[in-house]
Image: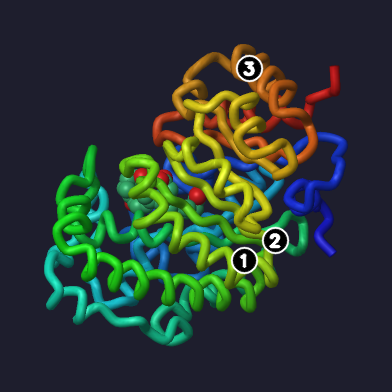
């Protein structure tokens, strides 16, 4: 039994004393102790060493006080396991020396045995679960197939993922073959994480908002739906699509336990689009954590009133920014803990 089970109760839609809170990308870069480790070990060494991944995962629980932990790792360990080389360049971010750009490239992409290639993640899950000692639940995650395709084809981060979109629209058959391989790998990967002990999973569709509503269904949602169908009987699934408010109605009928919302969609609009029954997660503008703590608290209380305290998980609308003062992240979390129904 998990001692603080507010997050799991909110995912089930149960009434809660106050909503739970965690922050996307909470395990990392704005924490001074993380920066010390970052100086010593490169990024994928931190991901591949269960002791380091565990240490980083529990940092925000002890130092910021969130109600759930998210495993320190990256969405790009999945393409690595599929035979697509991925490096993390300091200052630049992900860098793929041999992007997938043709039918022949797609043929070389494999659907691996995830226990073999990603066994280190399952070790990190088991070690983190022991370290957390059932204080709070542990979230496992994966990127959406579309978001992984964006990096696999573009070869690096981008403002518009133009090369990835060109690939999909000029060679849709190869794009769908690649998306299906990523989907099959992701389903096996998330199932293995659940077996290893995670209490819920989140799918990050960070670049879904790059697509038109129709293309979103064809190139992104169709595959996320397969993942939800495969996982929903085993664990609560949260689907987060950045910039995907236009798809919230379909997402609400998917069997997901909760949907992530970014800050460009108001709480009322998100409730209206989703029919009012599904748990929503979000949607504080990450840049609003630059505001002074008193303002952050006022805005968080307002946000909870707007979403309502039930069927709600307080979060940011995207990942925390690297230069946010830790005190401001703490103020965000404290505001939720101090919340009283008005
Ligand atoms: O949420 C967490 O705290 C758990 C850890 C986590 C990381 N990446 C660690 C990380 C999670 C959930 C991710 C997901 C991820 N990775 C996404 C989806 C969420 C989102 O923010 O949109 C994406 C698109 C990536 C790909 C990625 N990884 C990028 C673009 C970068 C570089 C820029 C950046 O965001 O910092 C990374 C590197 C990365 N992943 C870092 C961390 C802590 C920072 C680099 C480092 O520590 O050396």
287 is higher (above) or lower (below) than 310: above
Assess disc 2: are there few (<14), some (14-19) or many (≥20) residues with their C-alpha within 10 Å of its C-alpha. Answer: some
Task: Using the numbered discs, state the Cα–Cα distance from disc 3 to disc 2 in whole angstroms.
Answer: 30 Å
Judge left or right: residue 202 versus residue 82. Answer: right
Which image quadrant is residue 260 in?
top right
**Which quadrant is the C terminus positioned in?**
top right
Query: Which residue is at a point 85% across and 40% down the rendered structure image?
Result: 16
| The one of 175 and 237 positioned closer to us in this rendering | 175
Residue where numbered disc 1 is placed: 128
Q: Which of the labelled discs sits on residue 35, or is there none?
A: none
| The one of 9 and 184 positioned closer to us in this rendering | 184
**Which quadrant is the N terminus positioned in?**
bottom right
Judge left or right: residue 331 versus residue 222. Answer: right
Judge left or right: residue 145 versus residue 273. Answer: left
Where residue 74 appears, as percent x and y from the top left, is 41, 59
Q: Is the CB–ligand 1 distance for label 2 below 8 Å? A: no
| The one of 133 and 298 positioned closer to us in this rendering | 298
Where residue 272 appears, as percent x and y from the top left, is 65, 30
322 is higher (above) or lower (below) than 147: above
Give the mark, 1 or 3, whose residue is nearer the N terminus. Answer: 1
Residues at discs 2 and 1 in contact (Cβ within 8 Å): yes
Task: Using the numbered discs, state the Cα–Cα distance from disc 1 to disc 3 in whole angstroms.
Answer: 33 Å
Assess disc 3: are there few (<14), some (14-19) or many (≥20) residues with their C-alpha within 10 Å of its C-alpha. Answer: some
186 is higher (above) or lower (below) than 92: below
Q: Is residue 317 visible?
A: yes
């Amino acid at each position: 039994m998990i001692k603080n089970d507010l997050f799991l109760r909110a995912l089930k839609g149960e009434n809660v004393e106050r909503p739970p809170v965690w922050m996307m990308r909470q395990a990392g870069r704005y924490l001074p102790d993380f920066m010390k480790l970052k100086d010593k070990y490169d990024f994928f060494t931190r991901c591949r060493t269960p002791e380091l991944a565990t240490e980083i995962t529990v940092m925000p629980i002890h130092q910021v006080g969130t109600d759930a932990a998210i495993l320190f790792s990256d969405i790009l360990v999945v393409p690595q396991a599929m035979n697509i080389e991925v490096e993390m360049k300091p200052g630049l971010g992900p860098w793929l020396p041999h992007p997938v750009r043709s039918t022949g490239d797609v043929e070389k992409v494999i659907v691996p045995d995830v226990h073999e290639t990603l066994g280190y993640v399952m070790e990190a899950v088991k070690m983190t679960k022991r370290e957390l000692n059932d204080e709070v639940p542990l979230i496992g995650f994966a990127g959406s197939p579309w978001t992984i395709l964006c990096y696999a084809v573009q070869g690096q981060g981008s403002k518009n993922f133009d090369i990835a979109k060109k690939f999909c629209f000029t060679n849709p058959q190869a794009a769908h073959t690649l998306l299906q391989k990523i989907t099959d790998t992701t389903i096996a990967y998330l199932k293995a994480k659940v077996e290893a002990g995670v209490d819920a999973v989140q799918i990050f569709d960070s670049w879904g908002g790059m697509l038109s509503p129709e293309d979103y269904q064809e190139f992104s949602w169709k595959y996320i739906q397969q993942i939800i169908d495969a996982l929903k009987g085993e664990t609560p699934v949260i689907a987060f699509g950045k910039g995907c408010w236009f798809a919230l109605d379909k997402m609400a009928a998917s069997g997901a336990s909760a949907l992530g919302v970014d800050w460009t969609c108001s709480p009322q609009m998100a409730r209206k689009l989703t029919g009012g029954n599904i748990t929503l997660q979000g949607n504080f503008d990450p840049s609003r954590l630059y505001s002074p703590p008193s303002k952050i608290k006022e805005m968080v209380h307002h946000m909870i009133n707007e979403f309502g305290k039930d069927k709600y998980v307080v979060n940011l609308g995207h990942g925390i920014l690297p230069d946010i003062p830790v005190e401001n992240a703490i103020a965000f979390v404290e505001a939720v803990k101090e919340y009283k129904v008005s």
